[in-house]
Image: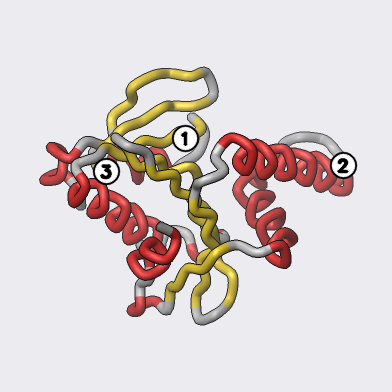
Amino acid sequence: MTRAWIARLAQPGVGLSAREIVDGDREFLRDLYASTRAEELAPVPWPEAEKQQFLTRQFEAQHAHYRENLPDADYLLLEIAGEPAGRIYLDERHDEIRLVDMALLPEHRGAGIGSGLLRTVIEAAVESGRTVRLHVERHNPAWRLYDRFGFVELEDRGVYRFMEWRPRQAERSP
């Protein structure tokens, strides 16, 4: 399904394209991960080198967990004008499309790119009659995006909100 997602996720108007992640992307992916945790770690009184070591360990653990537990997922790098800009990980299941992860570099956040990607995933769900499910950390401001698109919380999983979008909510999609 990777090729289908690569074609679907493209946003020519903003120069966005997607491609499969390769080993050479690891440093970018680690830095992207760190950018998503920067605000959370800002008040932590560790030296910068210690924060970077922590973030590297966290990224490696997350990366290994995804690859081990979701071997058939689509792991895609997002590029704008040919430069790495983010990632999106999708796992298609019989009854759902799991949005495993979606992240953009800070300079690309808030420009409608994430909304466009989410809209594309929802369109695929509508076409196939499936739901879209995801986990989002409570402190992550992305939950507001999911809320705007009509996702509802299925379960409080501690630091995570387990959320779902159902096809009948299509009229609520911005």
**Residue positioned 35% across, 42% down in the render:** 97
For the residue labelled by badge 1, is the local secondary structure a helix, a strand or a loop?
strand
Picture disc at residue 50: 2
**Residue positioned 29% across, 35% down in the render:** 95
Place residue 151 in its image quadrant: top left
> What residue did someone put label 3 on?
148
Q: Nearer the viewer, residue 108 or 10?
A: 10
Residue 46 x %, y %? 85, 37
Neighbours of disc 3 within 10 Å: few (<14), some (14-19), many (20+) = few
What is the spatial separation of the Cα atoms under label 1 and label 3, in whole angstroms? 14 Å
Between circles 1 and 2, the one closer to the viewer is 1
Residue 42 appearing in the image? no
Place residue 16 in its image quadrant: bottom left
**Residue positioned 51% across, 46% down in the render:** 72
User: 156 above or below 148?
Assistant: above
Give the amino acid at mark 2. Answer: Glu
> What residue did someone put label 1 on?
136
